[in-house]
Amino acid sequence: MIEKQPVLRLENIVKTFPGVRALDGVSLTVQPGEVHALMGENGAGKSTLMKVLGGIYQPDEGQIIVDETPVVMSSPLEAKAKGIVFIHQELSLAEELSVAENIYLGELPRKRFGLVDWDRLYAQTNAILDKLRVTFDAKTRVGDLSIANQQMVEIARALTVDAKAVIFDEPTASLTDAEKVVLFDVISDLQSQGVGIIYISHRMEEIFKITDRISVLRDGSYRGTVNTAETNEEAVTQLMIGRKLDLSRTERTHELGEVALEVRDLSCGSLFKNISFQVRRGEVVGFYGLVGAGRTEIAETLFGLRDPSSGAIFLDGNEVRIHSPADAIAKGISLVPEDRKGQGLVLGMNCRDNMTLPQIDDLTAGPFVAEGSEVAIFDQYRDRLDIRTPGWKQLVGNLSGGNQQKIVIGKWLSMHPNVLIVDEPTRGIDVGSKSEIHNLIRDLAAQGYAVIVISSEMPEVLHVSDRIVAMYSGRIMRTFTSDEVTEDNLIQAISGLKGDELVA
């Protein structure tokens, strides 16, 4: 049997930035038709390695070999021309343009005299969209699509190229379960065509479901490659973080306080109806459900981003009216949003300014900001939350996902809220940082905060919550205590089932 030649090889890649050796002799081989997972904590070097492969960075040492031919990737366009296609976690779409224009941007089919061949453009695009089984068409404005559907547009771009290797970076972060099935079918089709896949994800269940091999980076160095079928989650985690990870639930050792937040029969149009629940001080209440169940919409209503159509909200026993985020903040409600980069941070600003942004008016003396007070607030929460950054001047966009999330949490803790709502607290965060965020949430509850956690990950919501609210189609199906909840009854509840019957 003739051994197949790799479609892609990265050999001894070195990349150094001022004061940091981001990649220290990293090698990676991708075979035709294999799905090769690339794993590591945030800051391990995965993104830097992919930017070298994609022509964004030039390596200081080492080489890239495509189909046994050494190449120099001088730009992303050159990488694409050589058959290396990226599907990025961070969307890079032009919202005002159509789906078709986004997919073929820079490569629009032309007729005579350089005119765009719109009929061919739309036909080609719709043929690709049919493979993805989406509900929108080529002419749809991208800005009108949900984040999940925008991610499907990103994926569609890969199908327009005669690809040799496709890199998927956290592709399922915004997808529903049904859309994940379609994505995995697309990956299977690419495999059957001999395309090599590099799959970057923090979701272990996906890694063990669809990949053939797993390569691990830690601190910019290559730590090894294992066959997926011959390893397990614990072994991969230990390879990633250099230690065993304790994922067991820490039982509550403190007493619960008074009810901090009560919601009675709250409705918001067709998004959710007749929602009632309580959160006590010192308690973590988890909200779990499928995409579209209404969890995030409830959080947005409590934070004043949506106006309820009926119902009441009580804080410390007093009914309150919340018409804007400013109202919510003034009344002691803070929201760590699902999209930390788009909604929770200003990536081009430094860590200190991000953390003190909501209270800048209180830190202003005349026309000047009290810089000393800002730095003191940053220092306090950097130490309290163990935020790893060289100093407050560091741009928040340069931090790892876990440290960015801690900046957002610190920003709201510095406002001394009564209720802290955390939506998808560990989305896009590595397994080691996940554990830190989980411990932080439990610690905040122990300090007397009333905490709401919204998560799409069952292990997470089971791990951090004292009680779990299971939602289906805008309604609460059941509320579980940590003692009575099981994976089976939780899945049953979020699927709209009571016994074996589907709730209408």
Image: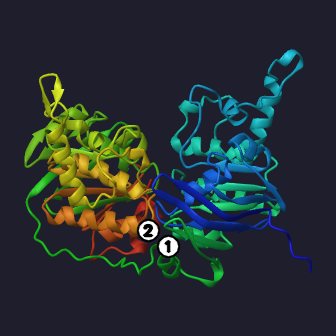
Mark toward the viewer: 2 or 1: 1
Q: Is residue 96 above or below residue 415?
A: above
Label 1 secondary element: helix
Q: Which of 254 and 260 is in front in this view?
A: 254
Q: Which residue is rendered at x = 39% and y = 41% of the image?
A: 271
**Marks 1 and 2: in contact by CB < 8 Å?**
yes
The answer to which quarter of the image holds residue 401 is: bottom left
Q: CA separation, marks 2 and 1?
A: 9 Å
> Does residue 115 appear to the left or right of 95 in the view shown?
right
Type of the residue with mark 1 = Met
Left or right of 260 in this view: 339: right
x 21%, y 54%: residue: 381
Q: In terms of secondary structure, where does tag 2 sit?
A: helix
The quarter in which the N terminus is drawn is bottom right
* Residue carrying label 1: 240
Foreground pick, 222 / 385: 222
Residue displayed at 40% across by 59% down: 426
- Residue name at image x 56 percent, y 30 percent: 95
Amino acid type at mark 2: Val
Give the image location of residue 174, x and y in percent.
51, 50
Query: Does residue 273 appear anywhere in the picture?
Result: no
Outermost top residue: 113
Q: List the residue tagged with mark 2.
A: 431
Q: Position of residue 204 (x, y in %)?
A: 52, 70
Q: Position of residue 392 (x, y in %)?
A: 29, 47
Picture quarter containing residue 310? top left
